[in-house]
Image (cartoon, helix red, strand yellow):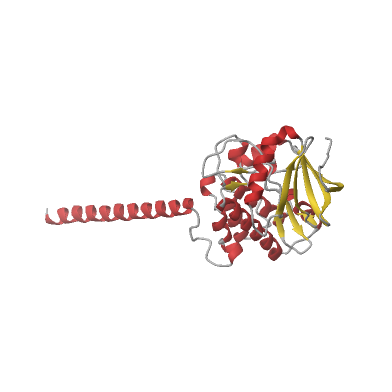
Amino acid sequence: MEISFDFDLKLIHQIGHGAFSQVFLGEYDSKKVAIKVMDPCYIEQFKKEVEILESIHHQNFAQYYFSKEGESSLYIVQEFLEGKTLTQLIKTVEMEEAHVKQIITELLNAVSYLHSQDIIHRDIKPDNIIITTEGQLKLIDFGLSSHSESKLSYDKCGTLLFMAPEMIFKQPYLKSVDIWSCGIIAYQLINKKHPFWDPLESTSTFIQRVQQFNPNFSGMNEYQRSFFLKCAAYSPEARMNATQALQHPWLSGKGELWQPITMADMKTLFDNKMKTIYYIKTLMMMKFLCQEVWNYNVTK
C-alpha cells in the first residue's frame, strides 16, 4: 500500500496491522500519534469507523484527532497509547484478583458507554485492550463496530475465540455479544487460559466445546463462576447487560448471588414461585379431599 500525506504528518514505524489496515507510530504537531492507514477500496468501512470515533468521548478510549481521505490512502489519526496489550499482560503478569476486577470494571465501563450510544464493538479481545503506563484501560479498534439502534444484526465478524455463539452460527444478535466477550476475558484473566479453546485442537473442536458449554471452574470461587456464567451464558437472554455486570457481587462487593440480576433470573424466580404456589394448592386440595373422604367414612 502506497502511503502519502498532503500535509505535515510524519511516519516513524509500523506498530500493528489488521485485515483492512496498517497502524503506524507517527508525529503530528510535535506529539506522538497513532495513524491507521487503509486502502481507498475500504472507503465505506472507513466512513463508518470515523463516524463512530467522532461520537465517542470517554476516558476508556483513545482520543480521536482527525481523519483524511488521500488520493492513495485513507487514514485516521488518534492519541498514541503508551502501554501493553492485555494479551501481553496475560502472558507475563501474575495478577491479583483485585487487579483482575479493576480491569474488568474498566472494560465494562467502556462497554456500558458504547451500548448507551447504541454502538456494538463486535471485536472485544485482549489484543484490542491496552493498559497504559498510567494503569488505565483503553478499548481500541472500531473497524468492525456498528450502530445497533436496538436492531438485530446478522453479520458474522470479529475474532472467533471471543465470538458469541449466536454470531458463530450466524444467528441474529444484539449488544449482548460484547458481554460474552467480556466474560471470556474475565475467565482468561483468572485462569490464564481460554474456557473453550486448546491451541493443540482444531477449530471445529473449539466450536463443539462452545456448544457443549462445559468449562472447567476448578480455579474459580463461586462469585467468579457466577459472574462468568451470567456474562458468557449460552443464551443471549440470560446474559447480564454491562450495567448489571458492574453491579454483580463479584465486582461491586454488594448483594448476594441468589438475588436476580437479569430478566432470565427474574423469569426463573417467577416460574419457581408459580411452581411453589401450584404445589401448595395441590397439597391443600389433597388435604381437603382426604378430609372429606375421612368425614364420609366416619359418618357412614
**Splitting the image into 4 quarters, where does residue 211 fall?**
top right
* Viewer-nearest residue: 277 or 87: 87
User: At which x and y percent is residue 295?
Assistant: 16, 56
Disc count in the image?
Answer: 0
Q: Residue furthest left?
A: 300
Q: Residue furthest top?
A: 41
Q: Residue furthest front?
A: 7
User: At which x and y percent is residue 61?
Assistant: 69, 55
**Splitting the image into 4 quarters, where does residue 165 fall?**
top right
* Viewer-nearest residue: 227 or 114: 114
**Splitting the image into 4 quarters, where does residue 43 fall?**
top right
Residue located 59% across and 52% down the image: 231
Q: Is residue 168 left or right of residue 85?
A: left
* Viewer-nearest residue: 15 or 106: 15
User: At which x and y percent is residue 145?
Assistant: 64, 43
User: At which x and y percent is residue 274?
Assistant: 36, 52
* Viewer-nearest residue: 124 or 94: 124
Q: Is residue 23 left or right of residue 62?
A: right
Residue 64 can be seen, yes or no: yes
Residue located 50% across and 54% down the image: 262
Q: Residue furthest right?
A: 12
Residue 200 can be seen, yes or no: no
Q: Is residue 93 above or below residue 165?
A: below
Q: Is residue 196 left or right of residue 6?
A: left
Residue located 33% across and 52% down the image: 278
Where, quadrant-wise, is the N terminus in this rendering? top right
